[in-house]
Image (cartoon, rainbow, N blue to C red):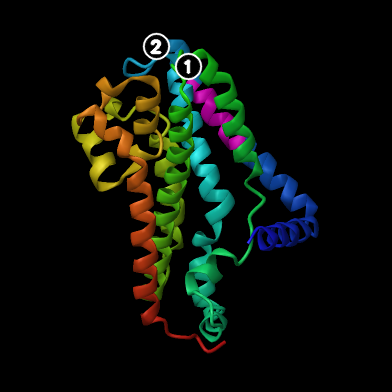
Protein backbone atom coordinates (compact mmCIF):
# COMPACT_ATOMS: atom_id res chain seq x y z
CA UNK A 1 0.00 0.00 0.00
CA UNK A 2 2.85 2.38 0.84
CA UNK A 3 4.38 1.69 -2.56
CA UNK A 4 1.06 2.41 -4.28
CA UNK A 5 0.77 5.66 -2.36
CA UNK A 6 4.26 6.75 -3.41
CA UNK A 7 3.44 5.90 -7.01
CA UNK A 8 0.22 7.92 -6.83
CA UNK A 9 2.08 10.85 -5.30
CA UNK A 10 4.76 10.71 -8.02
CA UNK A 11 2.14 10.63 -10.78
CA UNK A 12 0.32 13.57 -9.18
CA UNK A 13 3.56 15.54 -8.99
CA UNK A 14 4.42 14.85 -12.63
CA UNK A 15 0.88 15.83 -13.65
CA UNK A 16 1.08 19.12 -11.78
CA UNK A 17 4.50 19.88 -13.26
CA UNK A 18 3.00 19.75 -16.75
CA UNK A 19 1.20 22.98 -15.83
CA UNK A 20 3.61 24.62 -13.42
CA UNK A 21 2.15 28.09 -13.73
CA UNK A 22 -1.32 26.83 -12.79
CA UNK A 23 0.16 24.86 -9.90
CA UNK A 24 1.96 27.90 -8.51
CA UNK A 25 -1.03 30.18 -9.04
CA UNK A 26 -3.24 27.73 -7.14
CA UNK A 27 -0.85 27.70 -4.19
CA UNK A 28 -0.50 31.50 -4.18
CA UNK A 29 -4.27 31.86 -4.45
CA UNK A 30 -4.84 29.61 -1.43
CA UNK A 31 -2.22 31.53 0.55
CA UNK A 32 -3.80 34.87 -0.38
CA UNK A 33 -7.33 33.73 0.47
CA UNK A 34 -6.34 32.36 3.86
CA UNK A 35 -4.18 35.39 4.56
CA UNK A 36 -7.25 37.58 4.00
CA UNK A 37 -9.16 35.50 6.56
CA UNK A 38 -6.31 35.85 9.04
CA UNK A 39 -6.27 39.59 8.45
CA UNK A 40 -10.00 39.85 9.12
CA UNK A 41 -9.67 37.85 12.35
CA UNK A 42 -6.70 39.98 13.42
CA UNK A 43 -8.72 43.17 12.88
CA UNK A 44 -11.56 41.81 15.02
CA UNK A 45 -9.20 40.78 17.78
CA UNK A 46 -7.44 44.15 17.68
CA UNK A 47 -10.77 45.97 17.92
CA UNK A 48 -12.43 43.83 20.60
CA UNK A 49 -9.55 41.99 22.30
CA UNK A 50 -11.25 38.62 21.86
CA UNK A 51 -14.27 36.82 20.42
CA UNK A 52 -17.05 35.47 22.65
CA UNK A 53 -14.67 35.37 25.62
CA UNK A 54 -11.91 33.60 23.68
CA UNK A 55 -8.49 35.27 23.65
CA UNK A 56 -6.53 35.97 20.50
CA UNK A 57 -4.28 32.89 20.74
CA UNK A 58 -7.32 30.70 21.45
CA UNK A 59 -9.14 31.98 18.37
CA UNK A 60 -6.04 31.35 16.26
CA UNK A 61 -5.82 27.81 17.64
CA UNK A 62 -9.42 27.27 16.54
CA UNK A 63 -8.64 28.73 13.10
CA UNK A 64 -5.53 26.55 12.81
CA UNK A 65 -7.40 23.37 13.70
CA UNK A 66 -10.15 24.21 11.22
CA UNK A 67 -7.58 24.88 8.52
CA UNK A 68 -5.68 21.67 9.34
CA UNK A 69 -8.90 19.67 8.99
CA UNK A 70 -9.67 21.40 5.70
CA UNK A 71 -6.15 20.55 4.54
CA UNK A 72 -6.79 16.87 5.24
CA UNK A 73 -9.99 17.08 3.22
CA UNK A 74 -8.39 19.00 0.36
CA UNK A 75 -5.17 16.99 0.24
CA UNK A 76 -6.61 13.48 0.45
CA UNK A 77 -10.30 13.76 -0.50
CA UNK A 78 -10.47 16.60 -3.02
CA UNK A 79 -11.74 14.24 -5.69
CA UNK A 80 -15.06 14.10 -3.84
CA UNK A 81 -15.85 17.47 -5.41
CA UNK A 82 -15.31 16.11 -8.94
CA UNK A 83 -18.13 13.59 -8.84
CA UNK A 84 -20.43 15.77 -10.95
CA UNK A 85 -17.84 15.82 -13.73
CA UNK A 86 -17.23 12.07 -13.46
CA UNK A 87 -20.96 11.41 -13.81
CA UNK A 88 -21.84 13.93 -16.50
CA UNK A 89 -18.89 13.14 -18.79
CA UNK A 90 -19.49 9.40 -18.63
CA UNK A 91 -16.16 8.69 -16.95
CA UNK A 92 -18.13 6.70 -14.39
CA UNK A 93 -18.74 4.08 -17.10
CA UNK A 94 -15.12 2.98 -16.77
CA UNK A 95 -15.49 2.58 -13.02
CA UNK A 96 -18.32 0.10 -13.52
CA UNK A 97 -16.13 -2.11 -15.70
CA UNK A 98 -13.35 -2.51 -13.15
CA UNK A 99 -13.41 -5.07 -10.31
CA UNK A 100 -12.50 -2.37 -7.79
CA UNK A 101 -14.63 -0.39 -5.34
CA UNK A 102 -16.37 2.54 -7.04
CA UNK A 103 -15.53 4.78 -4.11
CA UNK A 104 -11.83 3.86 -4.15
CA UNK A 105 -11.66 4.56 -7.88
CA UNK A 106 -13.11 8.01 -7.27
CA UNK A 107 -10.81 8.63 -4.31
CA UNK A 108 -7.67 7.56 -6.19
CA UNK A 109 -8.65 9.33 -9.40
CA UNK A 110 -5.99 11.93 -8.80
CA UNK A 111 -3.91 12.99 -5.83
CA UNK A 112 -4.31 16.71 -5.16
CA UNK A 113 -1.20 18.81 -4.59
CA UNK A 114 -2.62 22.24 -5.34
CA UNK A 115 -3.84 22.65 -1.75
CA UNK A 116 -0.30 22.77 -0.39
CA UNK A 117 -0.95 26.43 0.45
CA UNK A 118 -3.63 25.35 2.93
CA UNK A 119 -1.15 23.03 4.61
CA UNK A 120 1.40 25.84 4.94
CA UNK A 121 -1.15 28.23 6.46
CA UNK A 122 -2.46 25.63 8.94
CA UNK A 123 1.03 24.63 10.07
CA UNK A 124 2.14 28.26 10.42
CA UNK A 125 -0.90 29.34 12.42
CA UNK A 126 -0.77 26.34 14.76
CA UNK A 127 2.98 26.76 15.19
CA UNK A 128 2.36 30.36 16.25
CA UNK A 129 -0.77 29.90 18.37
CA UNK A 130 -0.32 26.61 20.23
CA UNK A 131 2.71 27.73 22.32
CA UNK A 132 0.84 30.91 23.29
CA UNK A 133 -2.41 29.24 24.31
CA UNK A 134 -1.18 27.80 27.64
CA UNK A 135 -2.25 24.24 26.85
CA UNK A 136 -1.49 21.51 29.38
CA UNK A 137 -0.07 18.97 26.95
CA UNK A 138 -0.06 15.22 27.46
CA UNK A 139 0.75 12.48 24.92
CA UNK A 140 -2.89 11.42 24.95
CA UNK A 141 -4.05 14.98 24.23
CA UNK A 142 -1.60 15.33 21.34
CA UNK A 143 -2.81 12.07 19.80
CA UNK A 144 -6.41 13.15 20.32
CA UNK A 145 -5.74 16.39 18.45
CA UNK A 146 -4.35 14.46 15.49
CA UNK A 147 -7.45 12.24 15.49
CA UNK A 148 -9.75 15.26 15.76
CA UNK A 149 -8.07 17.01 12.82
CA UNK A 150 -8.26 13.86 10.68
CA UNK A 151 -11.91 13.31 11.63
CA UNK A 152 -12.74 16.93 10.84
CA UNK A 153 -11.28 16.53 7.37
CA UNK A 154 -13.28 13.34 6.87
CA UNK A 155 -16.46 15.11 7.98
CA UNK A 156 -16.01 17.87 5.40
CA UNK A 157 -15.13 15.26 2.76
CA UNK A 158 -18.23 13.28 3.71
CA UNK A 159 -20.47 16.30 3.14
CA UNK A 160 -18.86 16.87 -0.26
CA UNK A 161 -19.33 13.19 -1.13
CA UNK A 162 -23.02 13.34 -0.24
CA UNK A 163 -23.36 16.50 -2.30
CA UNK A 164 -21.63 14.86 -5.25
CA UNK A 165 -23.63 11.64 -4.94
CA UNK A 166 -26.80 13.62 -5.53
CA UNK A 167 -25.58 14.18 -9.10
CA UNK A 168 -26.64 10.61 -9.89
CA UNK A 169 -30.22 11.86 -9.56
CA UNK A 170 -30.00 15.63 -10.00
CA UNK A 171 -28.80 17.53 -13.04
CA UNK A 172 -26.05 19.50 -11.33
CA UNK A 173 -24.88 19.98 -7.75
CA UNK A 174 -21.63 21.88 -8.35
CA UNK A 175 -23.04 25.11 -6.90
CA UNK A 176 -23.33 23.34 -3.54
CA UNK A 177 -19.57 22.71 -3.53
CA UNK A 178 -18.76 26.36 -3.07
CA UNK A 179 -21.59 26.73 -0.57
CA UNK A 180 -20.14 24.06 1.71
CA UNK A 181 -16.63 25.50 1.44
CA UNK A 182 -17.93 29.03 2.11
CA UNK A 183 -19.88 28.00 5.20
CA UNK A 184 -16.90 26.10 6.61
CA UNK A 185 -14.45 28.87 5.73
CA UNK A 186 -16.63 31.72 7.01
CA UNK A 187 -18.43 30.46 10.11
CA UNK A 188 -15.96 27.75 11.12
CA UNK A 189 -13.23 30.20 12.12
CA UNK A 190 -14.97 31.45 15.26
CA UNK A 191 -16.33 30.05 18.54
CA UNK A 192 -19.83 29.16 17.49
CA UNK A 193 -21.51 30.53 20.62
CA UNK A 194 -20.96 33.92 18.96
CA UNK A 195 -24.00 33.05 16.80
CA UNK A 196 -26.18 32.54 19.87
CA UNK A 197 -27.65 29.40 21.38
CA UNK A 198 -29.73 28.59 18.31
CA UNK A 199 -26.75 29.03 16.00
CA UNK A 200 -24.50 26.86 18.16
CA UNK A 201 -27.08 24.05 18.19
CA UNK A 202 -27.69 24.39 14.45
CA UNK A 203 -23.99 24.14 13.62
CA UNK A 204 -23.70 21.08 15.83
CA UNK A 205 -26.79 18.98 15.09
CA UNK A 206 -27.98 20.15 11.66
CA UNK A 207 -24.79 21.21 9.87
CA UNK A 208 -22.02 19.63 11.99
CA UNK A 209 -19.52 22.44 11.50
CA UNK A 210 -18.76 22.46 15.23
CA UNK A 211 -16.83 19.19 15.01
CA UNK A 212 -14.28 20.65 12.59
CA UNK A 213 -12.94 23.48 14.74
CA UNK A 214 -14.97 24.73 17.67
CA UNK A 215 -15.36 21.53 19.69
CA UNK A 216 -11.77 20.25 19.19
CA UNK A 217 -10.39 23.69 20.10
CA UNK A 218 -12.64 23.95 23.17
CA UNK A 219 -11.49 20.57 24.44
CA UNK A 220 -7.83 21.28 23.78
CA UNK A 221 -7.96 24.72 25.41
CA UNK A 222 -10.06 23.70 28.39
CA UNK A 223 -12.94 25.90 27.20
CA UNK A 224 -15.66 23.30 27.68
CA UNK A 225 -17.65 26.06 29.38
CA UNK A 226 -18.35 27.54 25.94
CA UNK A 227 -20.11 24.38 24.72
CA UNK A 228 -23.87 24.02 24.99
CA UNK A 229 -23.68 20.31 25.93
CA UNK A 230 -21.82 18.43 28.70
CA UNK A 231 -18.11 19.00 28.14
CA UNK A 232 -17.04 15.38 28.49
CA UNK A 233 -18.96 14.53 25.31
CA UNK A 234 -16.49 16.65 23.38
CA UNK A 235 -13.77 14.03 23.79
CA UNK A 236 -15.87 11.70 21.63
CA UNK A 237 -16.25 14.26 18.84
CA UNK A 238 -13.83 12.53 16.38
CA UNK A 239 -16.30 9.67 16.15
CA UNK A 240 -18.79 12.04 14.54
CA UNK A 241 -16.43 12.76 11.65
CA UNK A 242 -15.70 9.08 11.16
CA UNK A 243 -19.40 8.23 11.33
CA UNK A 244 -20.38 10.93 8.84
CA UNK A 245 -17.73 9.77 6.39
CA UNK A 246 -18.84 6.14 6.68
CA UNK A 247 -22.48 7.10 6.12
CA UNK A 248 -21.47 9.23 3.13
CA UNK A 249 -19.75 6.23 1.51
CA UNK A 250 -22.90 4.14 2.01
CA UNK A 251 -25.03 6.96 0.55
CA UNK A 252 -22.68 7.21 -2.43
CA UNK A 253 -22.98 3.47 -3.08
CA UNK A 254 -26.77 3.56 -3.00
CA UNK A 255 -27.07 6.65 -5.18
CA UNK A 256 -24.67 5.17 -7.74
CA UNK A 257 -27.36 2.58 -8.57
CA UNK A 258 -29.30 5.39 -10.23
CA UNK A 259 -26.48 6.20 -12.63
CA UNK A 260 -27.56 6.66 -16.23
CA UNK A 261 -24.70 6.81 -18.71
CA UNK A 262 -24.69 9.87 -20.97
CA UNK A 263 -23.45 7.56 -23.73
CA UNK A 264 -20.28 9.52 -24.41
Residue at horizontal 43%, vertical 85%? 260
- Residue under circle 2? 48
The tag on residue 57 is: 1
Q: Is residue 232 left or right of residue 163?
A: left
Q: Quadrant of the N terminus?
A: bottom right
Q: Nearer the viewer, residue 95 or 7?
A: 7
| Circle 1 SS class | helix
Give the vertical position of 149 relative to 87 (above or below). above
Give the vertical position of 26 relative to 120 (above or below). below
1 or 2: tag closer to the N-terminus: 2
Q: Nearer the viewer, residue 65 or 198?
A: 65
Q: Position of residue 7 (x, y in %)?
A: 72, 62
Residue at horizontal 46%, vertical 62%? 174
Specify the quadrant of the image occupied by residue 49.
Answer: top left
Give the vertical position of 156 relative to 199 (above or below). below
Q: Is residue 137 left or right of residue 233?
A: right
Specify the quadrant of the image occupied by residue 170.
Answer: bottom left
117 magenta-colored? no
Q: Residues within 10 Å of mark 2 (few under 14, many from 20)?
A: few
| Circle 2 SS class | helix
Residue at horizontal 41%, vertical 71%? 167
Q: Foreground mark, 1 or 2? A: 1
What range of the chain is rendered magenta?
A: 32-41
Give the mark count.
2
Give the vertical position of 208 relative to 66 (above or below). below
The tag on residue 229 is: none
Amino acid sequence: MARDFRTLLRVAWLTEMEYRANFLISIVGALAYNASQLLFISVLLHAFGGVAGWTGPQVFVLFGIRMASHSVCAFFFRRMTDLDTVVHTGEFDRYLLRPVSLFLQLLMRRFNLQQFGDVVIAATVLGFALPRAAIDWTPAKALWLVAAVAAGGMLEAGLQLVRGALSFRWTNTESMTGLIETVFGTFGNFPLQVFGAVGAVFFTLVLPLAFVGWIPAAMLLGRQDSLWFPGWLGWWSPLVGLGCFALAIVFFGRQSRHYASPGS
